[in-house]
Image (cartoon, helix red, strand yellow):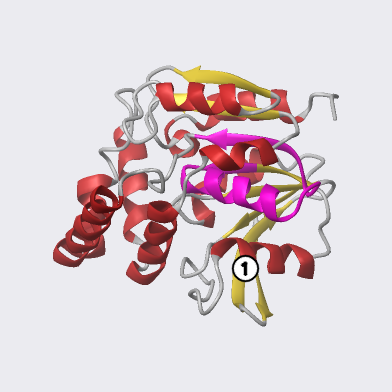
């Protein structure tokens, strides 16, 4: 099924997304180096009997940059405009943190949740260390520009089993991210700490880690799963930080098995 590109103008700014299928809604939230189009495979494979929505975060794709509100405020504004009051969700990397924040802000909104290569955030680090990391990434992006930055980091985040095609696509996706959108997401990641937020994810959850993921190592995934009230954990062998691009078919199998479970 071909995904349809859509936009809506809201008080907080325009939101763009890709949508496919009909039925109960399933939200796909990309990470800091992604975009709605990174979910192209899942928009097709998960859309049988579901309304799959992959948003572009503020400043990404066709979505307006942040202006006076946060990412989760914009996400809630968009979902309210679509009259969605209950949904399943998959959050990749920083997107996992956004789902935890979403659950805290709107209890009862999320039914089943997948945290895919979840990041912890840097909010628990000492202020001096956190600030050094924040500034280093900003300077790296400034010096290299989007293309050079993507060439350096886009392929490096993938696992040893990733194909050359997957590496090229990961680089292309990251290179397409506007600097302003990336930096706003980077500030959100620097400030966040997922661990205190996890109790808000009270429904069934699945944490998926990649064996070769250096940004969100399996040890972190296991720790997050252990802290969730009702979570399972799965380790994808040979996969790095980008299963939707590296191993889409294997990821589909995991997602469909979890999303189709009967437990509420």
Q: Is residue 96 magenta?
A: yes
Q: Nearer the viewer, residue 98 or 237?
A: 98
**Is residue 2 in sight in this rendering?**
no
The residue drawn where x is 38% and y is 27% is: 217
In the image, residue 138 sits, relative to residue 94, either above or below, namely below
Q: Residue at x 39, y 61 (%)?
A: 187
Residue at the spot 53% in from the left edge and 35% down from the top edge: 116
Farthest-out residue, left: 143
Residue 124, image quadrant: top left
The vertical placement of 84 against 215, above or below, is: below
Q: Residue under label 1, please give it.
A: 74
Q: Residues within 10 Å of mark 1 (few under 14, many from 20)?
A: many
208 left or right of 164? right
- Depth check: give the residue in front, 211 or 188: 188
Residue 59 seen from this side: yes
| Start-end of magenta stretch | 90-116
Residue located at (82% from left, 41% from top): 49
Left or right position of 81 against 250: right
Number of numbered tags placed on the structure image: 1
- Camera-side residue: 256 or 108? 108
Question: In the visual, does 120 lie left or right of 103?
Answer: left
Q: Nearer the viewer, residue 106 or 142?
A: 106
Quarter of the picture containing the C terminus is top right
* Residue 57 among those drawn in magenta: no
> Could you say where residue 183 lies in the image, as x and y percent from the top left?
35, 64
Measured along the vertical axis of the image, is residue 138 above or below residue 166?
below
């Amino acid at each position: 099924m071909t995904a349809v590109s859509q936009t809506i103008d809201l008080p907080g700014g325009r939101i763009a997304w890709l949508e496919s299928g009909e039925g109960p809604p399933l939200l796909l939230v990309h990470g800091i180096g992604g975009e709605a189009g990174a979910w192209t495979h899942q928009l097709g494979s998960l859309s049988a009997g579901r309304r799959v929505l992959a948003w572009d975060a503020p400043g990404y794709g066709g979505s307006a940059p942040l202006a006076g509100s946060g990412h989760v405020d914009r996400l809630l504004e968009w979902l309210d405009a679509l009259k969605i009051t209950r949904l399943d969700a998959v959050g990749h990397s920083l997107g996992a943190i956004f789902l935890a924040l979403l659950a805290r802000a709107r209890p009862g909104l999320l039914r089943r949740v997948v945290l895919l290569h979840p990041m912890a955030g840097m909010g628990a680090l000492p202020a001096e260390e956190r600030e050094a990391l924040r500034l280093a990434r900003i300077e790296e992006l400034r010096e290299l520009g989007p293309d050079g930055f993507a060439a350096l980091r886009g392929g490096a985040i993938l696992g040893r089993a990733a194909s050359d095609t997957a590496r090229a696509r990961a680089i292309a996706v990251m290179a397409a991210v506007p600097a302003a959108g990336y930096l706003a997401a980077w500030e959100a990641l620097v400030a966040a700490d997922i661990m205190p937020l996890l109790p808000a994810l009270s429904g069934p959850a699945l944490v998926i880690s990649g064996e070769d993921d250096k940004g969100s190592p399996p040890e972190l995934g296991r720790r997050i799963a252990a802290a969730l009230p009702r979570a399972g954990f799965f380790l994808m062998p040979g996969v790095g930080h980008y299963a939707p691009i590296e191993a889409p078919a294997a990821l589909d199998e995991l997602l469909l098995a979890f999303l189709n479970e009967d437990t509420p």
